[in-house]
Image (cartoon, coloured by chain):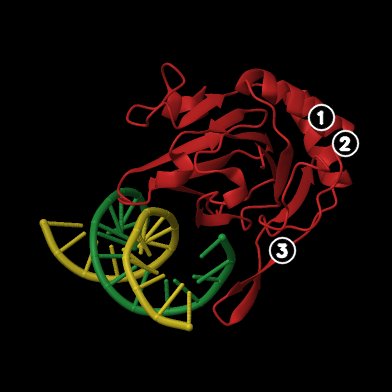
Chain colours: A red, B green, C yellow
Amino acid sequence: MEQLSFFAEQGQSPGLPAELLEYHPGLFGERESEFLLQKLIRESPWQQRVVKMYDKEVITPRLTAWYADPETYDYTSLRRSKPNSWTLELLLIKDKVEAIAGLKFNSVLLNYYRDGNDSVAWHSDNEQALGTHPVIASVSFGQVRCFDIRKKQDHRQKYSIKLESGALMIMKGNLQADWEHRIAKSLRPMRPRLNLTFRVVM
DNA sequence: TATGTGTCATGGAA
DNA sequence: GTTCCATGACACAT
C-alpha cells in the first residue's frame, strides 16, 4: 500500500521508536468507515472552540465533540464543557479499539477536519487528567491526512505518518512527554476527515 | 496552540 | 548554464 511507505516492512518506520506508536491500518473497512464518517459528522454535537492567543481570540480551525463516562472524568482540568453521553456507534468503535489496545477507555474526543484548511498546530496532549505517559488510541475516518511528530528537544527529529480511513494509531510511552504532533494545513483539495481519540481520564 | 510574516532551500520553467 | 519564480519548510512575533 502506497501510504504505508513510512511503515513499509513490519508496519513500523525505520528510526521511529516502536514503543511510541503503533499503527493498525484497516481496523474498519472502507464501507464501514465511510458510513461512520457520514453518521458521526451528521449526528455529533459539534463545537468550535475559541482560544485566547495573546490579546486576540481565535476560533480553532476544526470542530470537536467530547464524550465520556458520566462519573469518572474531571472535565474542568480538561477545560471542556460537560461531556456528552456515549452513543451506540461510539461504544461499538470503543469496543473494537479496546480489543486491540488491551485497555479500557472512558472518554473520546472527536476532531472534525472539514477540509485542508482545518488543522491542529504543534502540541502535546499534556493534560494533567491524562497522566504523564498516557495511552491514546486514535481512529481515522475519511480523508487521509499526515500526522507529523517531532521531538521537543530537537526539531530535526521528525516523522510523518499518513493516517488512512479506518486505521487505528496508538500513541504511548514518551510520545506526549518528549514529542509534539500536528495535523498541518494543506493547499491540496481535501475531503472531510474525522478523528476519534480515546483516552483514559483520571 | 492560531496566524501572519520574513528568510532560506529546492526545483522546475524560461 | 543562469535566472526567475512558485512552493514549502522553519523560526519567530503576536
Position of A157 relative to A170 (above/below): below
Q: CA distance from mark 2 to mark 3?
A: 22 Å
Residue A49 is tagged as: 3
> For numbered disc 2, what is the local secondary structure?
loop
SS for dot 3 = loop
| Chain identifier of the residue bearing label 3 in the image | A
Q: Which mark is residue A91?
A: 1
Q: Say whether marks 1 and 3 touch (CB < 8 Å).
A: no
Q: Position of residue A38 (x, y in %)?
A: 82, 39
Which is nearer the eye, A130 or A166? A130
Q: Is residue A57 above or below residue A97?
A: below
Q: Are marks 1 and 2 in contact (CB under 8 Å)?
A: yes
Is residue A170 at all visible to an observer of this figure? yes
**Vertical side of A63 occupied by A44: above or below:** above
In the rendered structure, which amino acid carries the disc numbered 1?
Answer: Leu
Whether residue B10 sits left or right of residue A81 in the image: it is left
- Which quarter of the picture shows residue A196? top right
